[in-house]
Image: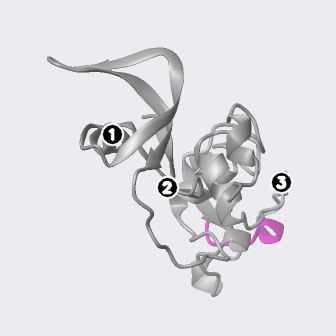
Amino acid sequence: MRETLVLNASFEPLSTVSLRRAVVLVMRDKAVVEQAHSGLLVRAAQVELPVPQVIRLRRYVRVPFRQRAPWSRRGVLVRDRHRCAYCGRRATTVDHIVPRSHGGGDTWLNTVAACAADNHRKAARTPGQAGMKLLVKPFEPTPADALLLALGLTEGESLPEWLTLPATA
């Protein structure tokens, strides 16, 4: 399912939502489409709408400042681009570097994406105990990085210039 970037009325990135949620926000006149996927349309009986890639809320929403991106299994898979940290194949699970049974927690720096075979082979051991090496080092994404990763973009890629420029008052 496609992800759509949601901007505040002031053009600040807020979050990503599903295509369905983005269409509902636009149809209810709560948001406007700022950038759409070229050539793709959502059609209904009475309406034809471009598939939104970026939407902007019509009214400003006050949100508390976040210095850290919240941890989630989905976030780890997206951060690691669904690639196993041990072998590089497609990852479908999240592995704890220090297993939870040994006191390891659900944190950005203690979890990596892993294929089911490597996750099972490592079991409740550290990579060193299992004789496995990490191909990539886990990192903690900033909230802005997390949004770009969720959209499958790298810094500034395929987003319009006006999104990366500071707003003028």
79 is higher (above) or lower (below) than 55: below
Q: Which region is colored magenta?
A: 122-129
Q: Which mark is residue 73?
A: none
Number of other residues with Cα within 10 Å of mark 1, as a class: few under 14, some 14 to 19, many 20 or more? some
Residue that mark 2 sits on: 9
Horizontal and vertical percent position of residue 90: 63, 37
Instruction: Quote the CA–CA distance across marks 3 and 2.
Output: 37 Å
Magenta span contains residue 127: yes
Asked if the magenta segment contains residue 55, the reply would be: no
Tags 2 and 1 touching, CB below 8 Å:
no
Q: Earlier in the sequence, mark 3 or mark 1?
A: 1
In the rendered image of this protein, does residue 54 appear above or below residue 169? above
The quadrant in which residue 100 appears is: bottom right
Percent from the top left, x then y, of residue 112? 68, 60
Foreground tag (3 vs 1): 1
Identified at 65% across, 82% down, the residue is 104
- Residue at the limit of the structure toward the front, as seen here: 169
- Relative to 157, say whether 21 is above or below: below
The residue labelled by disc 3 is: 136
Query: Pointer 1: what residue?
Result: 26
Residue sticking out furthest to the bottom: 103
For the N terminus, which image quadrant? top left
| Secondary structure category for the residue under label 3 | loop
Q: Along the horizontal axis of the image, is 166 left or right of 119?
A: right
Determine whether the residue tagged by mark 2 lies in a helix, strand or loop.
Answer: loop
Residue in the foreground of this view, choosing between 59 and 138: 59
Residue 27 can be seen in this image: yes
In this rendering, the count of numbered labels is: 3
Chain-order first, disc 2 or disc 1: 2
Amino acid at circle 3: Val
Check disc 1 and give the amino acid type: Val
